[in-house]
Amino acid sequence: MLGAKEIDTAPCARHALPIMTRHAVALVGLLLVVVQPWLGGCARRIIPPSLAELEEREIEYLAGIIRQQDRIIETMILRMEMEARRAAESGNPEEAIVDVLVLSGGGEKGAFGAAFLKAWGEVEEPGLRRPEFDIVTGVSTGSLIAPFAFIGTDEAYEVADSIYRNPRSDWVRKRSFLEVLLVQDSIFDDAGLLRTIEEVIAPRAGEIAAGLDEHRLLLIGATNLNQGMSSVWNLTELAAKVQRGEMSVEEFSRHNLSSASIPVAFPPQLLGGNLYVDGSTTRDILYLSPFDSTGELVARWRERNPGVRLPRMRIWVIANTAIIVPPVAVDPRDLPVLGRSLTLAIDQGLISQLRILEIETKLLALLHEQQVEFRYVSLPDGFEPAGSGMFNKSDMDRMADIGRAMGKDPRSWRSHVPDPMKPTALRAELERRRAGRQAATEAAQRDEGGPSPTGDPRN
């Protein structure tokens, strides 16, 4: 098979240098120059494909993407036809609805989305009650929540919430300095996170594969580094392969994990001869090409179902982050600057993608008379975890509590994505920060036993 190759030279690690003394550490810079060729040849590493190999594969790769998109559109139409028949048989053809759930990235902030989904099931208002989803998409941390939302049982939502409220200490392990030199693919080892997927998500492959018979879709977004493109894994199809014995549980789990493989932090995943990393690198939310205003889905529907109105489509987006981020004191060293820059790039990309999705849904309604609704929720503006370290439980509990409170309140949903740099948005943010500063000052005065804001002494 043409593509990247994984070379397992783990035995080299057994011949690594013993623990360095303080004098050896002082000479690390010189040692790197001397031993780098040895380390590069001795480490477990993935040899990338040549440019000639990539060029030979790119036509078939793109053709494969087109075939996959055709299958997705066909599945969507079959699901729409099923919903239209159900509504017609019930005597309410206007009630045919297709519900799409879109879950963004956000790392440990997935605690917000998992708790929101669970609490959403308590909403009683019919039009905003949590539905059974026809299509679920997820990126990064959203890819870990998506299978549970696709299964859609109360037990599945409970499990997803519990996973994020009880982060395991073995999900990620920081490698030692020597390990980083030897392994050279990531700062952290995420083997524990892979084990969790194998233990908790993979055993539900049968429930996921069952969605094929109902023409439902569970789609996960990753980034193909070799081809430089956003990529989609159809987990409903992959789960069916697991059921048929055509794919191992580990391979299925690695496809799922690839969407959350943060570059540099976590190892990339080698799948089908290509390297894959976090889906948020290219798209922090996965919305489908059939949603766009060119109307290919609409055209196919009308060709197959002349005179039959398309079902109403509702798109629900859960952004596992704040749209407006707070200021942060950034250490000027390399890694903190790099980390903050990447976070801001992804966050700003999410805003743009949400705005594009909002506009596309409006164009679908305007140009093709498609009934489509767009709603999204996110962590409150200005929210930032207070703790340190990845998967900090106190922060995740706090985000889960916020998600639970918002999930039970239908007013949490919004239908317009603001441009943070518009004058009206800037003025609103200024007032929000002033109010926050005033509230903090008043709270400090109360804690110190000083006068209340009205001037009355405290009792």
Image (cartoon, rainbow, N blue to C red):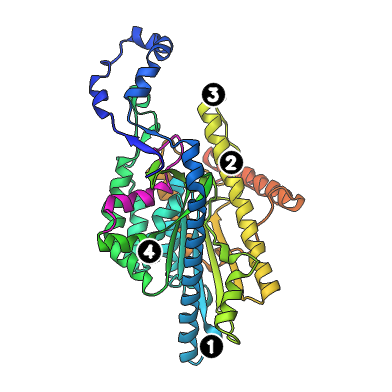
Where are the magenta residues, as a range?
246-268
State the image quarter where residue 417 is shown: bottom right
Chain-order first, disc 2 or disc 3? 3
Q: Label 2, label 4: how many angstroms apart (C-alpha)? A: 32 Å
Regarding residue 125, the answer to whether it shows in the image is no
Using a 10 Å C-alpha cutoff, classify the residue at mark 2 as few (fewer than 14 neighbours), some (14 to 19) or many (20 or more). few
> Nearer the viewer's eye, disc 4 or disc 1?
4
Note whether 240 is above or below 80 in the view shown. above
Q: Give the residue pinned by disc 3.
A: 333
Quadrant the N terminus occupies: top left
Note whether 46 is above or below 236 in the view shown. above
Chain-order first, disc 4 or disc 1? 1
Chain-order first, disc 2 or disc 4? 4
Note whether 189 is above or below 294 in the view shown. above
Residue type of the residue flagged with mark 2: Leu
Residue 455 versus residue 158: which sits nearer the camera?
158
Chain-order first, disc 3 or disc 4? 4
Using a 10 Å C-alpha cutoff, classify the residue at mark 4 as few (fewer than 14 neighbours), some (14 to 19) or many (20 or more). many
Residue 256 included in the magenta stretch of the image: yes
> Nearer the viewer's eye, disc 3 or disc 1?
1
> Nearer the viewer's eye, disc 3 or disc 4?
4
Q: Which mark is residue 236?
A: 4
> Nearer the viewer's eye, disc 2 or disc 4?
4
Q: Position of residue 349 (x, y in %)?
A: 60, 48
> Nearer the viewer's eye, disc 2 or disc 1?
1
Question: Going by the image, does 274 lie left or right of 154?
Answer: right
Q: Which mark is residue 344?
A: 2
Regarding residue 325, the answer to whether it shows in the image is yes
